[in-house]
Image (cartoon, helix red, strand yellow):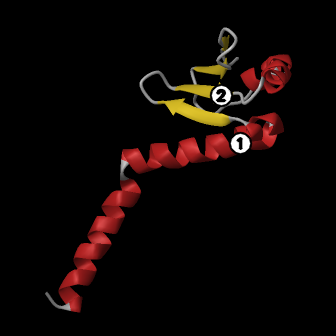
Amino acid sequence: MTNQEEDPLKSKLEKNLQESQWLQKFKQLSQGLSQIKTEIPLTQLCKLEWVTATDSLIIHCPNPEVRDGLCKLSSQIAQITIGAKCFIIRHPDYEDVTIEPV
């Protein structure tokens, strides 16, 4: 295959990828995770896990203090619009706290 033949194929594949729903969803999710880390800095200490099947964001807290701090910010977390149907604050020693967006 010559370079002239590869370029149209490469361009078509790149165009298809850019238009794909999967990529758009991935970009939206990436922006949403950046947004929550910016708006709720305490989440920077946590592991964030997106659950695609339920469109939920699980916030894994490293310690009880971070969990307590995030629970106090639940009304702020509920205001974040990243496409999540719910936010779940999780620490292994405590029950999960579920926050539904407003």
Identity of the residue drawn at 82% across and 39% down? 41
- Residue 7: horizontal and vertical position, in percent? 27, 82
Identity of the residue drawn at 66% across and 15% down? 100
Numbered mark located on residue 52 in the image: none
Q: Residue furthest front?
A: 93
Numbered mark located on residue 35 in the image: 1
Q: Earlier in the sequence, mark 1 or mark 2?
A: 1
Q: Quadrant of residue 65?
A: top right
Answer above or below: position of 13 versus 37.
Answer: below
Identity of the residue drawn at 62% across and 35% down? 48
Quadrant where the N terminus sits is bottom left
- Residue 16: horizontal and vertical position, in percent? 31, 59
C-alpha gap between disc 1 and disc 2? 17 Å
Quadrant where the C terminus sits is top right
Q: Residue furthest left?
A: 1
Looking at numbered disc 1 in the image, what kind of residue is underneath it? Gln
Residue placed under numbered mark 2 in the picture: 60
Which of pointers 1 and 2 indicates the residue nearer the eye? 2
Secondary structure of the residue carrying tag 1 is helix
Residue 18 as seen in the image, left or right of residue 88: left
Looking at numbered disc 2 in the image, what kind of residue is underneath it? His
Secondary structure of the residue carrying tag 2 is strand
